[in-house]
Image: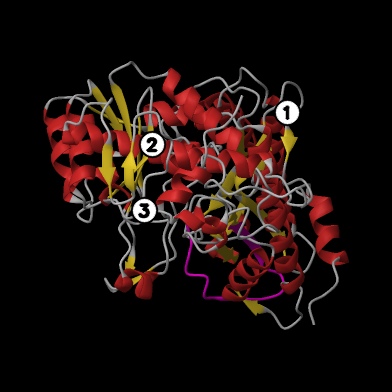
């Protein structure tokens, strides 16, 4: 078959010595031409021109059957690529986020973002479409920006659902997915926006690289008409409701969303996406392992720093952890690090991290990082002098036994709720044996007395968020590909008058990131020891921080 003149290379002949286009380059070029043809067709239909007529544009006559590319000077292509950018030039310049062209050392050819291929993103959208009825629509709204003092933006973190389905990592880009179409809505660039915030994605990148079927610029009449028509006729609109209520959301979205809500057609997007995100693909598991590897390095650096004979401040460990993770490619922390020593370890979400630590103290550290959109969440508790006291060891053994019992039971078909119940049984038995709780373990469970010392759940789903896929019940049977945390803990408050004094002010939590497989679970964070004797040896043997 012969290609129409200009479709592949603007009509330019190619010498024998020229390098043929790579398959990816050819595909991106064809996607750009297809989008241009759709835009031209939309213009023709809006103007009421018969499809067998000759269309006269600023680029000249376009007779029926001609495949000439629509000029970038057309109002429909404002902000799009120029003719010179029909290949890969538009990807080599900044388009708001790294690409395989602009950052070849970071992103391999055929991948949209580090570790995730274009084909995987396309597969995710196909799975999403399979859940939609013919007249249902998914509205992917960008996460609102957060600002310091209302002016300076914090580093942007994309909405996990939008990123999961599109690969888009930048602000102010929204998408609409229907059973037949994938449309991007891009911000309009101006000299002022470029000067203050830098470049953003342009139409050529949206279609040729990210695979959008069509593109509109937010703020234009065409975009407003498309959004209104698409959302108003949909029998159900799936969206992130919290983003839909943002005061910074463009007016072109607010009225159709308000109408869908008032008519009972607005649904939480998580009811679809969390089921897709719950089980991780091999590529996602690989990315989560990388995040855990950076976290392990951070913990090792912190344990080493904690061996200083003159003591240290909790903030030093928090800073050391973040520094180490960022040096290994992490974009941010998963959450504010919990670095609580001595009695401060009894505060589950302790975040002050401002107290001095001395030899003989017990250090609890709960920390994680986000690397390439996937997170880790690990907790260890260790004696800074490398030796557990007898009361510390008594409580540590209980937590460790609960940790191991839950890990042994973490199999397909078991739920997080089941694991939590296992941990409660082990904790209650241990607390009663030490005399911290009076009476039988059964009574401690029935009355809820154990919650005074074990107030949180055993674990949670893990993935693109620390508490990932929150709409998935903890009673759901786990399946291969799920990643969870196992994090039992005991906290004996310093003012617990009904507890033997030797146990007061001790807090211990042990947390691992665990991949559910068809057989034995895989502990992603196993490099950092958890057994009491191994922890003591690890602290004693690690090279001291000088």
Decide which of 100, 467 is in the foreground and name it. Answer: 100
Q: Determine whether, in the image, residue 45 is placed left or right of residue 369.
A: left
Decide which of 134, 262 is in the foreground and name it. Answer: 134
- Res. 504 visible in picture: no
- Magenta: main secondary structure equals loop
Mark seen at residue 72:
3
Q: Determine whether, in the image, residue 206 is placed left or right of residue 332.
A: left
| Percent x, y of residue 307 | 76, 73
Q: Residue at x 70, y 61 (%)?
A: 299
251, above or below 123, in the image: below
Mark seen at residue 50:
none
| Percent x, y of residue 460 | 53, 37
Q: Which residue is mark 1?
A: 408
Mark closest to the chain's N terminus, 2 or 3:
2
| Percent x, y of residue 517 | 71, 26
Q: Check the picture and name the quadrant holding the N terminus.
A: top right
Is the residue marked by circle 3 packed among few (<14), some (14-19), or many (20+) residues within 10 Å? Answer: some
| Separation of marks 2 and 3 at Cα, in angstroms | 12 Å
Decide which of 339, 59 is in the foreground and name it. Answer: 59
Q: To which quarter of the image does residue 524 belong? A: top right
- Res. 178 visible in picture: yes
6, above or below 356, in the image: above
The magenta segment: 349-366
Q: Looking at the image, is mark 1 or mark 2 nearer the viewer?
A: 2
Does the magenta segment cover residue 354?
yes
Image marks 2 and 3: residues in contact by CB distance under 8 Å: no
Mark closest to the chain's N terminus, 3 or 1:
3
Does the magenta segment cover residue 95?
no
Q: Which residue is mark 2?
A: 37
519, above or below 522, in the image: above
Q: Secondary structure at mark 3?
A: loop
| Percent x, y of residue 319 | 60, 73
């Amino acid at each position: 078959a012969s290609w129409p003149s200009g479709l592949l290379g603007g009509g330019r002949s190619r010498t024998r010595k020229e390098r043929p286009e790579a398959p990816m380059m050819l595909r991106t070029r064809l996607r750009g031409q297809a989008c241009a043809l759709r835009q031209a067709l939309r213009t023709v239909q809006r103007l009421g021109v018969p499809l067998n007529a000759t269309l006269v544009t600023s680029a000249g006559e376009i007779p029926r059957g001609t495949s000439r590319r629509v000029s970038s000077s057309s109002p429909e292509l404002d902000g799009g690529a120029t003719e010179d950018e029909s290949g890969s030039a538009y990807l080599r310049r900044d388009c708001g986020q790294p690409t395989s062209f602009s950052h070849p050392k970071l992103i391999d050819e055929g991948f949209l973002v580090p570790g995730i291929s274009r084909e995987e993103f396309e597969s995710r959208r196909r799975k999403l479409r399979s859940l939609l009825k013919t007249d249902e629509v998914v509205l992917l709204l960008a996460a609102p920006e957060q600002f310091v003092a209302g002016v300076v933006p914090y580093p942007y973190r994309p909405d996990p659902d939008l990123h999961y389905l599109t690969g888009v990592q930048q602000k102010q880009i929204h998408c609409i997915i229907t059973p037949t179409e994938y449309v991007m809505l891009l911000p309009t660039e101006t000299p002022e926006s470029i000067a203050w915030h830098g470049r953003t994605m342009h139409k050529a990148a949206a279609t040729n690289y990210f695979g959008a079927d069509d593109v509109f610029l937010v703020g234009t009449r065409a975009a407003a008409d498309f959004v209104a028509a698409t959302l108003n006729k949909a029998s159900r609109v799936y969206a992130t409701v919290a983003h839909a209520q943002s005061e910074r959301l463009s007016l072109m979205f607010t009225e159709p969303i308000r109408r869908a809500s008032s008519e009972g057609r607005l649904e939480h997007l998580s009811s679809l996406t969390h089921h897709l995100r719950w089980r991780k693909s091999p590529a996602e598991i690989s990315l989560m392992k990388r995040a855990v590897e950076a976290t392990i390095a951070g913990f090792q650096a912190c344990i080493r720093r904690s061996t200083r004979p003159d003591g240290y401040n909790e903030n030093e460990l928090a800073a050391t952890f973040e520094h180490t993770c960022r040096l290994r490619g992490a974009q941010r922390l998963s959450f504010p690090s919990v670095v609580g020593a001595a009695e401060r370890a009894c505060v589950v979400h302790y975040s002050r991290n401002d107290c001095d630590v001395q030899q003989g103290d017990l250090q609890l550290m709960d920390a994680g990082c986000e690397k390439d959109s996937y997170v880790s969440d690990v907790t260890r508790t260790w004696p800074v002098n490398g030796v557990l006291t007898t009361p510390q060891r008594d409580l540590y053994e209980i937590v460790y036994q609960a940790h191991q019992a839950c890990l042994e039971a973490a199999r397909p078909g078991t739920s997080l709720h089941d694991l939590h119940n296992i941990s409660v049984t082990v904790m209650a038995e241990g607390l009663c044996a030490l005399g911290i709780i009076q009476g039988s373990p059964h009574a401690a469970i029935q009355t809820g007395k154990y919650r005074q010392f074990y107030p949180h759940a055993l674990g949670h789903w893990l993935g693109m968020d620390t508490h990932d896929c929150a709409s998935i019940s903890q009673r759901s049977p786990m399946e291969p590909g799920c990643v969870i945390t196992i994090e039992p803990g005991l906290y004996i408050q310093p003012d617990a008058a009904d507890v033997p004094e030797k146990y007061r002010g001790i807090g211990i939590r042990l947390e691992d990131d665990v991949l559910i497989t068809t057989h034995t679970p895989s502990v992603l964070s196993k490099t950092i020891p958890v057994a009491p004797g191994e922890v003591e040896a690890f602290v004693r043997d690690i090279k001291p921080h000088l």
